[in-house]
Image (tube, helix red, strand yellow):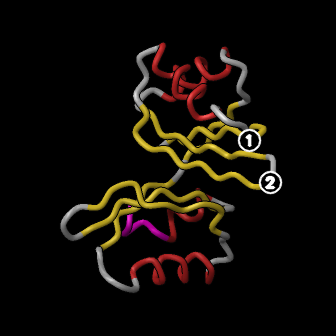
C-alpha cells in the first residue's frame, strides 16, 4: 500500500486545501490522519490512485512524499499487536508508523512502515 505524506506549516484551512486539490481531480480519500505539533502539520493519506494524487497535490504547491507500507491481517483479539511488534523487535526492526485501516468481524487490517520493510515481510509472512 502506498501512503502519501505531506509535511506543511500548520494553518487554518490546510486540510481543506489538500482535500480540495484532490477533489478537483476526482480523487477520493480512503484514509486520512493529521498530526499537528507546534507549527507543523503532518498529513498521511491513502487514496486509490497515488501517482495521480501526488501529481495533484504537488501542482497545488504541497511537498509530497510517498512510501510503501506493509499491509497486515491480525486477528481481532488482545495480544496480536504485541506478537507482531515483539517479532520485529527480536529481529532488530524498528516500527516507524502503524495504524488500523479497517476492522472486520474477526480481524483488523493494519498498515505498517518499519526500518526494514523487506526484512519485516519475511519476519511477518504469516500476517501478510
- Residue range in magenta is 124-128
Of all residues, the one furthest to the front in this rendering is: 12
Q: Nearer the viewer, residue 111 or 56?
A: 56
Position of 60 with respect to 78 (left or right) is right
Q: Is residue 125 magenta?
A: yes
Please give the count of numbered marks on the rendered protein. Answer: 2
Q: Which residue is mark 1?
A: 10
Q: Residue at x 29, y 74 (%)?
A: 76
In the rendered image of this protein, does residue 17 appear above or below residue 109?
A: above
Per the image, label 2 sits on a secondary structure element best described as loop
The answer to whether the residues at label 2 and label 1 have Cβ atoms under 8 Å apart is yes
Is residue 44 a member of the stretch shown in magenta? Answer: no
| Residue 48 percent location from the top left of the image | 40, 31
Q: Identify the residue shown where x is 40% and y is 28%.
A: 28
Q: Quadrant of the C terminus?
A: bottom left
Q: Quadrant of residue 114?
A: bottom right
Q: Position of residue 42 (x, y in %)?
A: 68, 46
* Side of 57 relative to 98 (left or right): right
Cα distance, mark 2 to mark 1?
Answer: 8 Å
Query: Could you tell which of marks 2 and 1 lies nearer the N-terminus?
Result: 1
Q: Residue at x 59, y 63 (%)?
A: 119
Reply above or below: 100 against 15. below
**Label 2: few (<14), some (14–19) or many (≥20) C-alpha neighbours in 10 Å:** few
Image location (x, y in percent) of residue 116? 65, 60
Of residues 68 and 13, the one drawn nearer to the viewer in this rendering: 13
Q: Main secondary structure of the magenta part?
A: helix
Q: Which residue is mark 2?
A: 38
Amino acid at each position: 500500500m502506498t501512503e502519501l505524506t505531506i509535511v506543511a506549516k500548520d494553518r487554518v484551512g490546510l486540510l481543506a486545501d489538500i482535500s480540495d486539490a484532490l477533489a478537483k481531480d476526482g480523487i477520493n480519500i480512503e484514509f486520512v490522519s493529521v498530526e499537528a505539533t507546534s507549527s507543523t502539520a503532518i498529513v498521511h493519506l491513502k487514496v486509490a490512485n497515488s501517482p495521480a494524487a501526488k501529481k495533484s497535490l504537488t501542482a497545488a504547491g504541497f511537498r509530497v512524499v510517498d512510501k510503501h507500507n506493509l499491509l497486515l491481517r491480525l486477528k481481532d483479539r488482545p495480544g496480536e499487536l504485541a506478537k507482531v511488534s515483539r517479532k520485529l523487535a527480536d529481529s532488530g526492526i524498528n516500527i516507524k508508523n502503524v495504524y488500523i485501516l479497517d476492522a472486520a468481524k474477526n480481524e483488523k487490517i493494519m498498515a505498517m512502515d518499519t526500518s526494514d520493510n523487506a526484512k519485516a515481510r519475511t519476519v511477518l509472512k504469516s500476517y501478510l
